Image (tube, grey):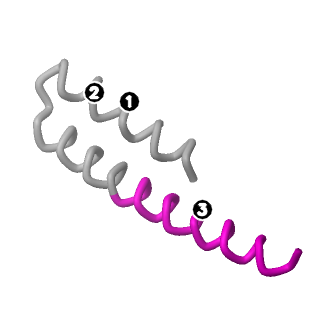
Amino acid sequence: MLRWTVTFIILALIAGVFGFGGIAAGAASIAKILFFIFIVLFIVSLIRGNKRV
């Protein structure tokens, strides 16, 4: 999931350089959402991993 976030960030940067503002904003918002989902899943996996030990 972190790979998708990086992909959308790169897509947003490239679209912003070439002047596609709408596409850049959309890709940046998708990257932001995916990043937060990744962080939440990471924290949940840390908590669940500690309970099993």
Real-space CA distance between mark 1 and mark 2, rounded to the nearest whole angstrom: 5 Å
Q: Secondary structure at mark 2?
A: helix
Q: Alpha-carbon neighbours of circle 1 within 10 Å: few (<14), some, or many (≥20)?
A: some
Hey, which residue is sitting farthest right in the picture?
53
Q: Alpha-carbon neighbours of circle 3 within 10 Å: few (<14), some, or many (≥20)?
A: few
Front in this rendered view, residue 12 or 32: 32
**Dot in front, 1 or 3:** 3
Tell me the amino acid under the disc marked 1: Ile
| Residue at the spot 77% in from the left edge and 71% down from the top edge | 49
Q: For mark 2, what is the residue?
A: 13
Give percent across and percent down for residue 14.
Answer: 29, 23
Hey, which residue is sitting farthest top in the picture?
17
Tell me the amino acid under the disc marked 2: Leu
Q: Are the residues at dot 1 and dot 2 in contact (C-beta closer than 8 Å)?
A: yes
Left or right relative to 5: residue 18: left
Q: For mark 3, what is the residue?
A: 42
Q: Earlier in the sequence, mark 1 or mark 3?
A: 1
Residue 42 to residue 2: above or below? below
Q: Is residue 51 magenta?
A: yes
Q: For mark 1, what is the residue?
A: 10
Using the rendered view, name the quadrant where residue 43 is placed.
Answer: bottom right
Using the rendered view, name the quadrant where residue 48 is placed.
Answer: bottom right
Q: Which residues are magenta?
A: 33-53
Q: Alpha-carbon neighbours of circle 2 within 10 Å: few (<14), some, or many (≥20)?
A: some
